[in-house]
Image (cartoon, rainbow, N blue to C red):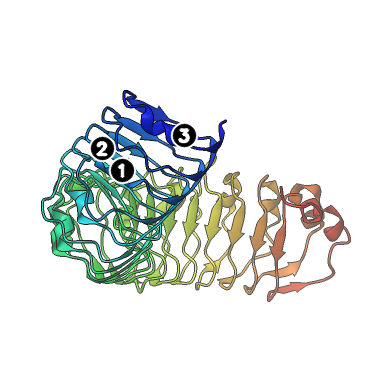
Amino acid sequence: GFKGSIPASFGNLTQIISIDLQGNSLEGQIPDVFGNLKKLTSLSFSSNNLSGPLPITVFNLTKITHLDLSNNHLEGPLPNHVSGLQFLDELLLYNNSISGGVPSWLFTLPSLLLVDLGYNKLVGPIDRIQKPSSIQEVYLSYNNISDSIPYSIFYLVNLTELHLSSNNLSGPIPDSIFDLVYLTLLDLSSNNLSGVIKSDMLSKLTSLEFINVSNLSNNMISGGISKWEAVLWKGLLWLDLSHNFLTALEQFPGNSLEYLNLHSNFLTGNITSSICNWSQLTVLDLSKNNLSGTIPDCLGNIGRLQLLDLQMNNFIGKIPNSFLRNSDLSHLLLNNNQLEGLVPLSLANCTSLELLNLGNNKLTDRFPHWLESLPRLQVLILRFNRFYGSLPHSIASSNFSTLRIIDLSGNEFTGTLPTKLFQNLRAMKEKPK
């Protein structure tokens, strides 16, 4: 690709319509010489090694529709005012070091549909928006934007995606966020937002599909997850409310969920039986709560489930013996509960299983040597249960050759360690690739 700096003579190309130099090795500053390129409709210098301030003359071009300076090392603030950009529909400045505030003109340009300023160093509150535009996608994640979410951002009634994660936003989540009826993705995660989730408000957002929805994780959301209008939420695929203060777990919307993460809350009670409707579920993380009762048998019947994490709760009874043949389950974490009985034989069906943690329970069984048939098992943790008897020589056979971690401490095993135990655990001798 091209190296060196961008020549200032670009400013003489008054008839040029498009400049695309993305993905090269250009260095130095972008010369601020674009004021005379009245016919320029597209400009891309993305994915280079450019540094220095933004070229302010670009923001006064009247014909430009596409401006992409992303993935560089540009710094300094955005201009406070712009006089051009009437036809700009995409503004991509993500992954730079742009600082200063978020000017309101970003949300008032008449043709702008997408603005991406993620992964920069923007600070301060978002300016009040005077004349809201038809913008559809706003990416401001991974900055240092503070203060509360301005009510005026919810005047952007055509928004389909709103990314504000990993900032320093605080205060309550405004009710007016639920007036954005076209939202398909809402990500407010890793902020300091607070308040109670209002189910009647959430049910307005009928278009949400990938709800990083309120991937309101690492906030201070309290209250309960009540019986949301499941019919209205048929399209919901992704829900992350981890690291909050949720207390109740009644029912979940729709039956299309693929990802549910509620770990590190204060949920109590049993797992609702409505979870059995989710045949598309791939990740279920309810760890680090105060859930109790038994684990529903149907969780073993979800063939697409890859991660089931119920650790650090108060579950009782037996582990379900309903795991399907050829299931996708790769990580099963049931440690730190009050589970009893045997290790279910149906786990032998889980040929994709890589991690099995049943530690810190009340399981009473002999060593489950039949787990040797699992071709991908790398981590086996059975610590602090009531396993008893001697360790069979099969634990040292080549069939356990993928094991990298095994923890059998705190049990009631007797006899001697098999002589070949440390010789044949081959994966422990290899560096992970």
The residue tagged 2 is: 61
* Residue type at tag 2: Leu
Q: Residues within 10 Å of mark 2 (few under 14, many from 20)?
A: many
At mark 1, the secondary structure is helix
Where residue 402 sits in the image (x, y, percent)? 72, 50
- Residue 373 at what x, y percent from top left? 69, 46
Quadrant housing residue 143: bottom left
**Viewer-proximal residue, 184 or 262?**
184
Q: CA distance from mark 1 to mark 2?
A: 7 Å
Asked whether residue 256 appears in the rendered view, the answer is no
Indicate which disc, 1 or 3, sits on the residue closer to the N terminus. Answer: 3
**On screen, residue 359 above or below 371:** below
Of discs 3 and 2, which sits in the foreground? Answer: 2
Q: CA distance from mark 1 to mark 3?
A: 19 Å
Q: Where is residue 77 shown, x and y percent of the image?
A: 34, 57
Residue 226 as seen in the image, left or right of residue 432: left
* Residue position for label 1: 57
Task: Answer whether labels 1 and 2 touch (C-beta < 8 Å).
Answer: yes
Check if mark 3's residue and mark 2's residue have beta carbons within 8 Å: no
Amino acid found under the numbered disc labelled 3 = Gln
